[in-house]
Amino acid sequence: MNSAHRGSSMDTDGRISRISGSTVEAVGLPGARMYDVARVGHIGIMGEIIRIEKGVTTVQVYEDTSGLSVGEPVLCTGQPLGVELGPGLIGSVFDGIQRPLGALRELEGDFILRGTDVCSLDRSALWEFEPAAAEGDRVEGGDTIGIVREGGKILHRIMVPPGMEGLIQDINAGSFRIEDTVARLKDSGGKERELTLLQKWPVRIPRPCGRKIPPDRPFLTGQRILDTLFPVALGGAAIVPGGFGTGKTVVEQTLAKYAHADVIIYIGCGERGNEMTEVLQEFPELEDPQTGGSLMERTVLVVNTSNMPVAAREASIYTGITIAEYFRDMGYHVALMADSTSRWAEALREISSRLEEMPGEEGYPTYMGTRLAGFFERAGHVQTLGKEDRKGSVTVVGAISPPGGDFSEPVTQGSMRISGALWALDTSLAHRRHFPAISWTRSYSLYCDTLAPWFMEEVSEDWPEQRMNLNRMLEREKEILEMVQLVGEDAIPESQRILLLGARLIRENFLRQNAYHPVDASCSLAKQYWLLRAFLESYQVTLKALERISLENIMSLSTLSDLARLNEQPDDAFPEASREVLAKLGGEIDEMARQIALQKEALEKETAGGEAGKKEA
């Protein structure tokens, strides 16, 4: 059973007075508070109080209300919706309100019965606790008192809950269940408090931190178009809007596998059941490139498919980001993938309409922008609580599914005002099999200037310059292509046709990336730099070669195919591989120019000899 669903109930039970879809109105709950969890009906369907007005309490129910009737009891637990935080999170699959789907399947089969009570974390599992503090130590919220090794590379830090402090009276090593007492504190008031392996936290309240750190380093994704053109800061927020079939889910799954993050939280919010089935089947089989083990050894999945109740969908992103903040507080860098926030906004719209609230644009509630901001603002790079010098981060990547690919719709526009990077997916690119189908003309990043010093120090001093040259080349290509549509390619100067050739090589072999290629699926920053530099320098070389050879000769150079395959070279082959290709390109141009000069000289001799013969005749 979810941690928020346990606890002493209020003295007075209410009764159902009205039912409208997923919302239930009850009377007779005088002590009810906003966002407390309630149990509805004889079978105890789970819900959350979302409105209290003139003695009538409105409950947003997380399960199907079929079969409920007026007059059935409503019980308020007196606790807000919360999650259980402790050993056992890593590798788990939860629904939107943190019910473990694996345990539910063992208990009930393939379909979840309403009113089911299952612990979010296994109460019978034993965990080996290694103390990191000693008796007599003074500790405060966020301090580590011990470590639990869950497997994989994640060391689970057992921390003092926020808001608690005192002297350790005793602490024990050994095997414990998550509810067993591992240490006792005495606070400044003389009250003793027991510490277990388990923490509980309300999902709608952000977990506190020491301080937020300015965005001064990037969240590396391994995707060239993102890291080079549209980087997002560590602890930043990015959105990935795109129409149907543009590859939003593939982009997020690729980031989950290759991004430089310690922990992955993947939220399937309102997605199709077959897509989430693929995720559940593929993630355990994916090899973690960091450890060589299973990707699930550092992943938590929160699943809420499109056929599940919309109220639970609305709660799912809060469940996921609270778990992400917990691992952030341990000092880990967490990547949260929300797929998709459009389905979450649709849940808000449906709930709002049942409450008969004043609708905003396209029927969405007027407070949708505030809710979006509250979610994205929980991202950040922070100094954690406690005396230890720990830094952690939560980087949020939210997919958006605008109807018809229309980026002017409210969810996309509201998210653009909050997030720091836009990775806009383009349907035309997807139809041309260009993946990731991220438009370099519509996308942007607000983090480029603040991250430039890091790139200059860690990669190369001319990184911003190379990035600027790439942008200029792509912009110039767009202008020339517009001209070509009017007059045809043969009517433009050869220098512009050379630029089109260089830009095409960059688009097809730098901006495009094969997610299924063993080498090209992920690309280090060093390789990105040298690969981009090779393409830009090859353009300059071929442009200068026009002074010696014709455009047709340049287009026939065999080295161009070597350039196109340069992205398949492993990281350790750079920069030598790029230098070799550029040297080969220059040598082939020199040889072709020499052959052309020899042919011209022979032709001139032949012509001169013919003229001399005519004079003699």
Image (cartoon, rainbow, N blue to C red):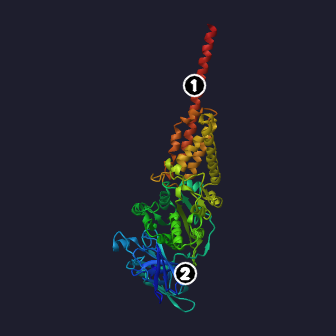
Q: Is residue 346 above or below residue 597?
A: below
Q: Amino acid at mark 2?
A: Ile
Residue at (53%, 47%) from the top-left corner?
Answer: 509
Q: If the image is split into quadrants, where does the N terminus sit?
A: bottom left
Which one is nearer the viewer's eye here, 599 or 369? 369
Residue 159 visible (yes or no): no
Q: Is residue 345 above or below residue 573?
A: below
- The local crowd at label 1, few if under 14, some if 14 to 19, many if 20 or more residues have their Cα within 10 Å, is few
Q: If the image is split into quadrants, where does the C terminus sit?
A: top right
Please report whichever mark, 1 or 2, sits nearer to the chain's N-terminal start: 2
- Give the residue number, with chain letter if any, for mark 2: 52
Which one is nearer the viewer's eye here, 137 or 92? 92
Residue 536 visible (yes or no): yes
Please state the horizontal and vertical placement of residue 290, each as a whole percent of the image: 47, 62
Q: Is residue 348 above or below residue 274?
A: below
> SS at mark 1?
helix
Please state the horizontal and vertical placement of residue 424, each as a whole percent of the image: 56, 56
Q: Amino acid at mark 1?
A: Gln
- Give the residue number, with chain letter if any, for mark 1: 599
Please state the horizontal and vertical placement of residue 81, each as a whole percent of the image: 49, 78
Q: CA distance from mark 1 to mark 2?
A: 92 Å
- Residue farthest toward the top in the current orientation of the protein: 617
Residue 163 disc label: none
> SS at mark 2?
strand
Please state the horizontal and vertical placement of residue 108, each as a whole percent of the image: 34, 73
Q: Nearer the viewer, mark 1 or mark 2?
A: 2
